[in-house]
Image: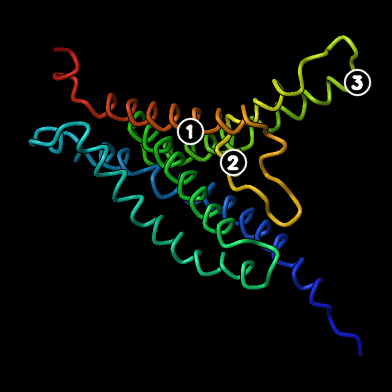
Amino acid sequence: EQGVAIDQVDNFGAPMLIAMLVMAVGALMVLVPSVVGGSIASERDAQTLQPLQLTALTPGDIVAGKLVASMAYLLLLLLCLAPALTIPFLVGGVSLGGALKSFGVLLLICVELAAVALAVSAALRRAVTANITSLIITGALMLGPFVVMGFAFLARSRDDAFQSDVSVLRLLGSLSPVSLFSWVGTIGSADTGEFAGTAGRVWSVVWWLLITIGALLVARRSVTAPTVRDR
């Protein structure tokens, strides 16, 4: 019987890590909107938001409290995943730094999706509607930029008149928080930052900041009591 060579075992780590990350991102796309999407909308639906607005808590305090409470549960789930991410490092082919960076990117994606879902929850009145809307917006945010980029590359290859710069087309993908994985570096023989380029990596962080902060500001605005907002 033939065994498995050591160099073949070393190559198992990279595809194993990539498969785990794909499953983790897919799980976050469903879990985060489901957990956060109804956090504020359920309060408004149950008519408990107005008494909360009459307390000494500011709208920012309410939004921050809902975000921290939701992130505490999601962070616990991510911590349960952390030991599994070390398996590719133990198998070989993936550095410990790469595994840690991948976990950090998952955490950043979780924060951005939670902020977006919180903004949707604060803007809508029904928890079920907020959850469904959050799922749709999350899917559009995560996959939409890559779909548009794919069609743009397809149009560029088929139409000679459409000669857009490749680097500009790649920047479309930086809108998605998935592009933050470009900061992980080399996973096995693949360089995650090679496709995005330096500009794409920088813009992935810029978009993450703009979307996260903007969503939290929208949530804060929506939670503000009408009497305070109209002053």
How many neighbours does mark 3 have within 10 angstroms: few (below 14), some (14-19), or many (20 or more)? few
* Disc 1 target residue: 208
Q: In which quarter of the image is the N terminus?
A: bottom right
Q: In which quarter of the image is the C terminus?
A: top left
Relative to 42, 135 lies left or right: right
Image location of residue 42, percent across then percent down: 30, 42
How many neighbours does mark 1 have within 10 angstroms: few (below 14), some (14-19), or many (20 or more)? many
Image location of residue 190, percent across then percent down: 74, 50
Tag count: 3
* Disc 2 target residue: 178
* Disc 3 target residue: 158
**N-term mark: 1 or 2:** 2
Relative to 228, 211 lies left or right: right
Q: Residue furthest top?
A: 161
The residue drawn where x is 27% and y is 28% is: 220
Q: Quadrant of residue 159?
A: top right
Image location of residue 203, percent across then percent down: 55, 28
Tell me the amino acid under the disc marked 2.
Val
Give the label on residue 94, or none: none
Relative to 102, 39 lies left or right: left
**N-term mark: 1 or 3:** 3
Image location of residue 7, percent across then percent down: 80, 71
Local secondary structure at mark 3? helix
Tell me the amino acid under the disc marked 1.
Trp
Marks 3 and 2 sit apart, C-alpha to C-alpha, by 27 Å
Tell me the amino acid under the disc marked 3.
Arg
Local secondary structure at mark 2? helix
Q: In which quarter of the image is residue 5?
A: bottom right
Query: In the figure, 177 relative to 100: above or below?
Result: above
Front disc: 1 or 3:
1
The residue drawn where x is 51% and y is 69% is: 83
Marks 1 and 2 sit apart, C-alpha to C-alpha, by 10 Å
